[in-house]
């Protein structure tokens, strides 16, 4: 099954049809998506700016991660769930625009970066996280995250405005 066929099936499903035709539910889902995106992206920016050494230099990284991680994961979960619902409502037109697959690629890349950071640095942040200047790998992970998630947000906002003629 091609990506276009999968999106068409999602769009033609009762859920996709209901969302696409709803006067109130679709805007509520989109609003929840944008609010949870702003929330989780804002927390990612705070975390990444600490990793890159721009803010909170006196705040140990493990404390910041411990306090923000549940909120960040919660916001991201809502963003992810509402994004899937929006995909049901948008249908196969998403594949025609090169923006959507590119957005998915950057989400994947950002997720790999987060996993790499977590496995390499996050688990033992209490050992190195009190330093003002963090290990180079942690700083690189912060920069990659900032750039990747910024691109995801920009591409996501461009989807409604750019069609396959882009």
Image (cartoon, rainbow, N blue to C red):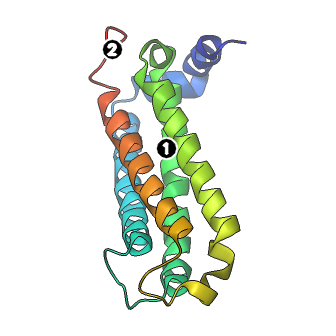
Q: Which residue ends up furthest to the right in the rendered image?
A: 1
User: Mark 1 or mark 2, which is nearer the start of the sequence?
Assistant: 1
Residues at marks 2 and 1 touching, judged by CB atoms closer than 8 Å: no
Q: Is residue 80 above or below residue 105?
A: below
Q: Which residue ends up furthest to the left in the rendered image?
A: 161
Question: Residue 37, position in %: x, y?
Answer: 40, 53
Reading the image, the residue beneath label 1 is 82
Give the residue displayed 50% in from the left and 39% down from the top: 106
Give the residue displayed 40% in from the left and 75% down from the top: 50
Question: Residue 42, position in %: x, y?
Answer: 35, 63
Q: Quadrant of residue 70?
A: bottom right
Q: Which mark is residue 163?
A: 2
Give the residue displayed 39% in from the left and 58% down from the top: 41
Give the tally of numbered discs: 2
Image quarter (top left, top right, bottom left or bottom right) of the C terminus? top left
In this orientation, which residue lies closer to the viewer: 12 or 157? 157
Circle 1: element type: helix
Question: Residue 8, position in %: x, y?
Answer: 58, 13
For marks 2 and 1, give the CA distance. 22 Å
Image quarter (top left, top right, bottom left or bottom right) of the N terminus? top right
Crowding around mark 2 (Cα neighbors within 10 Å: few <14, some 14 to 19, many 20+) is some
Disc 2 versus disc 1: nearer the observer: 2
């Amino acid at each position: 099954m091609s990506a276009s066929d999968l999106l068409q099936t999602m769009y033609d499903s009762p859920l996709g049809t209901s969302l696409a035709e709803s006067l109130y539910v679709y805007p509520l889902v989109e609003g929840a998506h944008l609010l949870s995106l702003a929330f989780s992206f804002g927390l990612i920016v705070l975390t990444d700016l600490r990793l890159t050494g721009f803010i909170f230099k006196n705040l140990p990284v493990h404390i910041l991660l411990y306090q923000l991680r549940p909120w960040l994961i919660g916001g991201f979960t809502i963003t992810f769930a509402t994004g899937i619902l929006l995909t049901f409502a948008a249908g196969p037109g998403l594949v025609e625009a090169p923006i959507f697959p590119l957005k998915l690629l950057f989400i994947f890349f950002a997720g790999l970066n987060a996993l790499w950071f977590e496995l390499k640095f996050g688990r033992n942040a209490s050992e190195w996280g009190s330093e003002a200047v963090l290990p180079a790998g942690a700083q690189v992970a912060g920069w990659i995250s900032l750039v990747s998630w910024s691109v995801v947000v920009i591409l996501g906002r461009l989807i409604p405005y750019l069609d396959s003629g882009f």
